[in-house]
Amino acid sequence: MPSSPSFTLVSRCTVSPDQISDIKTLKLSVSDIPMLSCQYIQKGVLLTSPPYSFDDLVCFLKQSLSTTLSYFPPLAGRLTTDPDGHVHITCNDAGIDFLVVKSPNISIHNVLVPGDVPDCVKQFFTFDKTLSYSGHFKPLAAVQVTELADGVFIGCIVNHAVTDGTSFWHFFNTFAEITKGALKISKSPDFGRNTVFNSQAVLKFPPGGPTVTFAGDEPLRERILHFSREAILKLKYRANYGCLLTKQTNSEVLGKLCNDSWKSVNVETNGKVRNSNDEISSFQSLCAQLWRSVTRARKLEPTKTTTFRMAVNCRRRLDPKLEPYYFGNAIQSIPTFASAGELLGKDLSWAADILHKNVVAHNNDTVRKGVADWEKQPRLFPLGNADGASITMGSSPRFPMYNNDFGWGRPLAVRSGRANKFDGKISAFPGRDGNGSVDLEVVLAPDTMLEVENDPEIMQYVSEFL
């Protein structure tokens, strides 16, 4: 809830589905339960002012949100734990919070000012630092709409034990779609629970529930680094061939890459040959560069083990595959390890290759083994950076964040709240210009951030600080 003098809470109410749910309960899965110690997801979109009054917008948003919840009834429910210790979503149509806030002294420019993400952004979200276990007695979701001097920010807050990023953006996109006037949604959620993630294993919690797994009071800086499509493709080339594009190769090769002809490029450089069968992806290349730069900035001992942790969507990795719009968490964490000395002593290609091999190896058998391992030893999701040498990559540039057109144009920007942030937490967003550009929301200790800002190896690819 806004606590700054620049923000005024106008109203807070409950919005319920406009139809009674025909789903009674949904059991939390092996992928959902570990997220009970994570804070509610806080993501939102910055928009220009609508072509009608703010009061009318609030009315339209309430109506469309009520309709949207009828397609996503679990979000209007509450968590319950049965006598055996299994946690369920009770779809009781209790509704979600809807907040209206005004901030006439904050402009779009204030939000998008170059430099560190301004503190005012954190005021665009409610349920600050709220653990997902709190869904036992709090709403599982909320929407906060904030009127700015020359724009609007719509923040969506959802319990992380109920949705992963795929389901979160499906709900948020549908909310926008209905507000824009759709009479029928384009993509229906799948609430099936007959999956490998459905388990009888129980994770026992202490009285009152779990605590957050990372320190929430450490000093942090947060910046958004923008990487253009061209910069990403240059990184991909370097990761796959172990060298920079030269003036001679730049025009021809980059031209093919920009025309999606990557698979036709088969170059031998420095003794390395790549083809489409073992191609390192653009995103893996970017992750490898970030891993190197942050590790260098931390000035770790060469023998110190570093970790790059990625959350991967398992829907398409399983056999048979889950429905693309399976509702809930369907993610697993992939940690990749390397000593600081090895990571920095070898080239980008080496780091990108071990990330790539780890991701490719996470197939149907690996997913199922991960489920079986968790059932033997139920545990919470390991958010945090306890050893000072870890990076956690969340979100995805594939999420359709800029599809949130509420009826008067695409978002100007995507921003997140304070939730689940610690030294080394990185979130990947698609760039607003699309075409493969990427924005990285980088959260680091102040000294580490300063070193990264002065690292030419990564900064040569950064178009701008957003």
Image (spheres, rainbow, N blue to C red):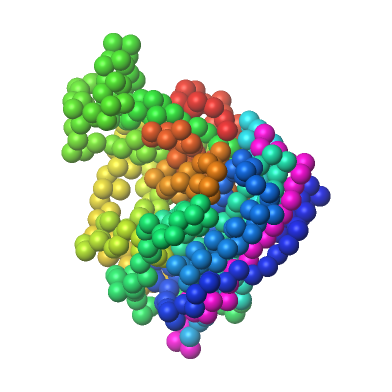
**Residue depicted at x 61% and y 76%:** 137
For residue 114, which quarter of the picture? top right
Q: Looking at the picture, tell me which residue is in the foreground, 218 or 178.
A: 178
User: Is 188 situated above or below 57?
Assistant: below
User: Residue pushed farthest right?
Assistant: 5
Using residue 35 as the reference point, say whether residue 58 is left or right of it: right
User: Residue pushed farthest top?
Assistant: 248
Using residue 211 as the reference point, say whether residue 359 is left or right of it: left
Instruction: Give x and y (percent) for residue 214.
Output: 57, 57
User: Is 269 situated above or below 280?
Assistant: above
Give, as a single range, the part of the protein colored magenta.
83-109
For residue 105, which quarter of the picture? top right
Q: The C terminus appears in which quarter of the rendering? A: top right
**Residue depicted at x 45% and y 40%:** 430
**Residue depicted at x 50% and y 82%:** 81
User: Is 347 situated above or below 319?
Assistant: above
Instruction: Give x and y (percent) for residue 63.
Output: 58, 63
**Residue depicted at x 75% and y 57%:** 9
Instruction: Give x and y (percent) for residue 220.
Output: 64, 44
On whether residue 103 falls in the magenta region, the answer is: yes
State whether residue 233 appears in this view.
Answer: yes
Q: The N terminus appears in which quarter of the rendering? A: bottom right
On whether residue 186 falls in the magenta region, the answer is: no
Using residue 116 as the reference point, say whether residue 374 is left or right of it: left
Instruction: Give x and y (percent) for residue 442.
Output: 54, 40
